[in-house]
Image: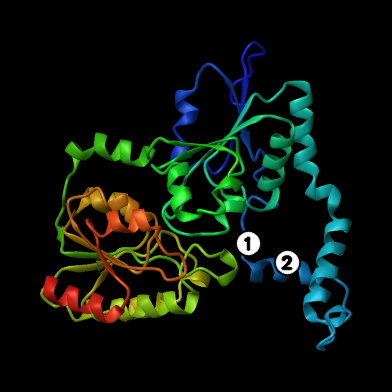
Amino acid sequence: LIYNDPGRKNILLIRPLYGLNFLENEIKKYNLISWPWQKTSQRTKTLDIAEQLDQILPLLSREQPVHTQDSDNSIFYWLKKNYLEHFRNNLPSILDNLMKLDQIHQEHGIDLAVWGNSPNEGEKALVVEYLLKKGVTVVGSQHGGNVGTQQIWTDLDVEFLCTHYLSYGFDIGDYKDLYPDNYNSISCSVIPVGSYYEYEKKKSHGNRHSQSTIDLLFPIHFNSSITHGDHRNKPDEYLRYQVTILEILEKLHNLNVVVKPFPKISKKVSAVDERLKRLKHIKVFDNMGLLSCLKQYNVQAVVMEGPSTCLFETIGENLELFLMADPNSPFGNQAYSLLKKRVHCFDKLEDLQEALFQYQ
């Protein structure tokens, strides 16, 4: 408990909060409970599928899978069987923190829960499902781009695990445009409130101290595993886009070009790490967030290998935007028609190259 006053209502803050981090300092009339409360909790770190297998396989039986057409003997059946075995054997530790939460709720009551990043896996998903089944009001918040503007079918299942959802701007009407036959699967209230990051950015606009001009910025993103979901283009295509854009930027000798990799990104999800070290014309800014870069430098234009939070963070700025469309997660008709009025959008890398050469 951050504050412990029996006369106040209790709010559970489910981390990471992203754009809702300000709540800790702003909410003074309530008891705040921060989750996870154990720094050593084994499920506070999200692992990709390879890391999960590395941790679990050594604990499983050594019976080798048989590669046949019979589904009962396939490697997938073997993994499923042993994952279930691992789950049964470790159920007490898996449910440990959930039981502690149940004790807090039984003794003190949880009046409201807030999350800033969709609780779509692991211990966090269990916590939110528990709260919803107990009838607790759960407020969720959009933490990045894509949601509400692009067709991302997994979002219908995992993005709206709450009773009230705070969006950057979309409402249920936008979901009717995206999913005319499926939007009714969203049972929570969608409330367009904007982004707190944008609110903070507007407040600090007069305090900018531009060190120098960046003619063209490439905030290169990490290349997700195919198990990450369909929030981005296929990993092989995404990499092809990134490599081609880097090759194009190397030819723009008349411009001051900067590549800004995703901050503190692991080499496991950065397929262009070695290529960045070999760049001759392009500067590389490591471990800098996009908002910090926009604040410190006079950025004239931004190129993106696909839609992401970067698009939302730059669309309100006075600069040129060049964007590769994502065939895997297309924009809704209404969103795309508005986007093309503001952003240079491209389906082919050849067209992007021509536009960047003309911009030069």
Total numbered badges shown on the rendered structure? 2
Q: Which mark is residue 210?
A: none
Closest to the observer: 360 or 92?
360
Measure the C-alpha gap from mark 1 to mark 2: 10 Å
Q: Is residue 309 left or right of residue 108?
A: left
Q: Position of residue 222 (x, y in %)?
A: 44, 66
The residue that mark 1 highlights is 47
Q: Which mark is residue 55?
A: 2
Q: Is residue 307 left or right of residue 248?
A: right
Q: Quadrant of the N terminus?
A: top right
- State the residue at coordinates (41%, 53%): 149
| SS state under label 1 | loop
Q: Position of residue 234 (x, y in %)?
A: 49, 74
Q: Quadrant of residue 282?
A: bottom left
Q: Amino acid at mark 2?
A: Gln
Q: Say which of marks 1 and 2 sits in front.
A: 1
The answer to whether any part of residue 310 appears in the image is: no
Which one is earlier in the sequence, the residue at label 1 or at label 2? 1
Q: Amino acid at mark 1?
A: Leu
Q: For mark 1, does the 10 Å Cα neighbourhood hold few (<14), some (14 to 19), or many (20 or more) residues?
A: few
Q: Is residue 221 left or right of residue 82?
A: left
List the single residue furthest toward the bottom: 68
